[in-house]
Amino acid sequence: MARKKEPTEEEARAILFERLREAKPGIVATTAHDTDIKPEHIAPAFERVMDLVEEPVPTPEQLKGWRKEGERFARAGAPSERVLDGYLSLNWAIWEAVMRQEDIPRSVVLEFADRLLRGLDDAVAAISQGYIQVEVEAAAAHSERRRAVLEDLLSAPRTTPQDRARIRLRSERHGLTIGASYRLVLVDVPSADETEIEALVDKLESRIRVPVSTHRSRPGIHLPVVLDWRGRVLVFASADWTGDKRLREALLVVLGGDIVVIDTGPVAGVDALSDALTQAEYSATVAEALGRRGWIGDPGELALETTFLLDRQLVRAAVDNELGPLLSDPRMGEELVETLEVHLGSKQNIRETARRLHLAPRTVAYRLERIETLLGQELDGEVTMRLGAALLALRVDRQVGGPSGPETPEGTEN
C-alpha cells in the first residue's frame, strides 16, 4: 500500500487557514462570551485579523485600514481599552483553534504564531494612531471653542442687558459660575515677540496647570488657563486658586526677570472680567513705559501715573502752570525742581533735604527762597499739594519720553 504524501508547507498553511475560517462561528462565540461584545462586531474583526496574518508583513494599505478603523471606533465613542481588549481576546481564540490542529507541521504553526503576534502589534499601533488622530482633532476643536468663549468672556462689551445675558449663558454652559470671584494675571514680556509668546504660554501652562486626570470628568473650561493675549501672557484663574507660589516660580523660570506682572486680585463675577482686564492691559502699558519691572500687583498701584497719561497735553499744561517759572530759569531750573521735589519728600525739613542732596543747609535755604520768589508764593498748605502733584506729573511725563509714550484709550488725546 502506497504511503500518503505529506503536504508541503504552503499546502499545510492553506489547510490551516481553511480550517480556521470553518471554525469562525466558534471563535466568534468564544470571543463574544469572553468580552461581552456582540458577535456581529467580532465577525468582521475576525476577517481583518485573518487578512492581516495571511501577509508575511502587513501592507501599507492594511495598516491604513486599521488606522481608519481606530478613527471609526473613536468617533463612535468606543473606549480604546475595550476595543483593544476585544482584539486581544479574538487573537487568543484564534490561537487556541490553531493549537488544536495537531496534524499541521510545527514550522507552519510557529510561522502563524509569529505573524499573529506581529500582526497584533501592528494592528494595535495602527488603531492607537487612529484614536490619537481623532483626539488631536477634538483637542484642536476644543481649543478653538475654548478660545472663542474666553475671548467673549474677557473682552466682549456688556453695554446692553442682552450682552450680559449672553455672556452669563456662555459662562454657565462652559462650567464657570456667574457670581464667583476670578483672578487675572497679565504678564508683559518686553523682549518677546508674538511668535515667542505662543511657545512661552505652552511652557508656562505645563508648569502650573492641574493634572488632567483630576478634572477629566468635568466638562467645560478648567481653570487656571494660560493664554497668549494680544502679545502678552494672561493667566485666568479662580480667585481662591492656591497656585500663586507655583506661578511666581514658573514666571521666573520660563519668562525671566524682565517682565511686568499685573495681578487684578479678586474680580467679582464674570460681568466684571472685561473691565478688569482692560485696566490691567493699560496698567501694563504704563508700567513698561515707566521702566517698571517685576510683580506690580494691583493695577491701582499705577492709577495715579495712569491718570497723568490719559491726557498728556492737559498734564503738560498743568506742569507749565505750576512749575513753569522754575523750569524756565536758564541757570538753575533743574536744580530748583530737584530741590523742591526732595524738600517736599523730606516733609519740608531743610536739614534732611540738605542731607539727601549732599548740600549745605544754607544752600538749600537759598534755593527754597529762590523757588518762592519765582513762584510768587510761599511753600505752604495747598500750594505744596499742587506742587507735589505737578512734580509727579512731570516725572511721569519725562519717564515715558516726552510726546511719545503708551497708547491712550480710545476717545482720549495725546
Image (spheres, grey):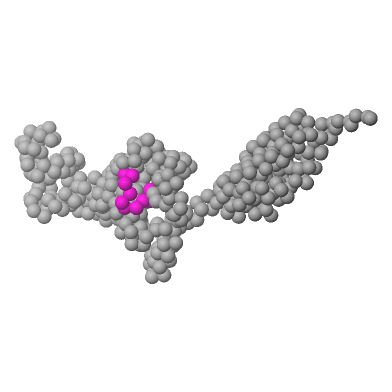
On the picture, is 214 further left or further right than 12? left
Task: Please provide percent x and percent y for residue 219.
Answer: 46, 56
* Residues in magenta, as a range: 232-244
Give me the residue at 30% from left, 43% from top.
295
Give me the residue at 93% from left, 29% from top.
2
**Can I make out residue 282 in this image?**
no
Residue 247: image quadrant is top left
Task: Please provide percent x and percent y for residue 320.
Answer: 22, 51
Task: Please provide percent x and percent y for residue 355.
Answer: 10, 34
Between 274 and 395, which is closer to the camera in this rendering?
Answer: 274
Residue 179: image quadrant is bottom left
* Residue farthest along the right direction in this orientation: 1
Quarter of the figure with the C terminus: bottom left
Is 219 drawn above or below residue 89 in the view shown? Answer: below
Between 345 and 226, which is closer to the camera in this rendering?
Answer: 226
On the picture, is 216 further left or further right than 23? left
**Can I make out residue 383 in this image?**
yes
Between 236 and 41, which is closer to the camera in this rendering?
Answer: 41
236 inside magenta stretch: yes
Quarter of the figure with the N terminus: top right
344 inside magenta stretch: no
